[in-house]
Image (tube, rainbow, N blue to C red):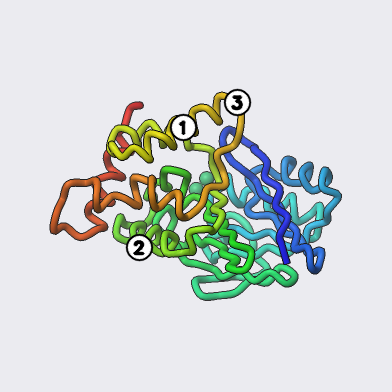
Amino acid sequence: MPLTIRQFPCLSDNYGFIFRDEASGRTACVDTPDAQAVLAALDDAGWGLDFILNTHWHPDHAGGNAQVQAATGAKIVGPAEVTRIAPLDRTVADGDVVEVGETRFAVIGCGGHTLGHVAYFAREAHVAFVGDTLFALGCGRVFEGTAQQMWTSLDRLAALPGDTAVYCAHEYTASNARFALSVDPDPAVKARAEAVFAARARGEATVPTTIALERATNPFLRAPQLAGMPGAPDYESFAAIRAAKDSFKG
Ligand code: ZN
Ligand code: FE
């Protein structure tokens, strides 16, 4: 059975997501970037809220947990690191399964941006909520983990089915596209960048993306081909591309 997903922009460049498992009517939100925006989206949809699924502990992801829970009674599910800023009702880690009605989400550990970051992948629904790990044409900054850990995490996400819709937590795509153009001459990157700039000029979201599109054009997933470091481990090529992005002035 399908999921109905509603996506809304909030804060300066975050996306919030609420979804409903149509078979059961069960609902969830992914992260709580802005409690008021999450509650307004639920109100607009006419939905209650059964679960909050957190990807990581950062305040623009878990900062609204208490307020959303107080207003809806939702149970909060997330990696242990979230307890740095808010309590959890259920702690999850890599390999766990979270059921929202009949939709089963595999919890994928993808540390690097933060050590305990997780993604939620629903194979039958062809959907992944990836927080700040994989972005459209980009990836999260490596704040807590190592480049090797982040590369392993991105590699796991890249191995999901190509038709998986990837819901990233920020609209960073135009800036990511400017960087991608600076390191990757592939015509597919140029075509995608132009489509991204046009979409943003029209005020349209560039999220969700797909795993197939990211495999083909994301400079971080393509780091081994782009970094010009033959013989080096892939994670070192990734680290080089990540460092170039961190200092990119585009
Ligand atoms: Zn973050
Ligand atoms: Fe974030």
In the displayed image of the protein, which residue is found farthest to the left? 231
Q: Earlier in the sequence, mark 1 or mark 3?
A: 1
Q: Residue 10: percent from the left, percent from the top? A: 65, 37
In the displayed image of the protein, which residue is found farthest to the right? 46
Tell me the residue that label 3 is attached to. Answer: 202
Which element carries disc 2, helix, strand or loop? Answer: helix
Give me the residue at 24% from left, 46% from top.
Answer: 226
- Is residue 113 shown above or below 44? below
Mark linked to residue 152: 2
| Label 2 to label 3: alpha-carbon separation | 35 Å
Q: Residue 222: percent from the left, percent from the top? A: 31, 50
Count residues near mark 3 (Cα–Cα under 10 Å), then give few for <14, some for 14-19, many for 20+: few
Tell me the residue that label 1 is attached to. Answer: 174
Which element carries disc 3, helix, strand or loop? Answer: loop
Give me the residue at 62% from left, 68% from top.
Answer: 124
Query: Which image quarter: residue 20?
Result: bottom right
Query: Which image quarter: residue 75?
Result: bottom right
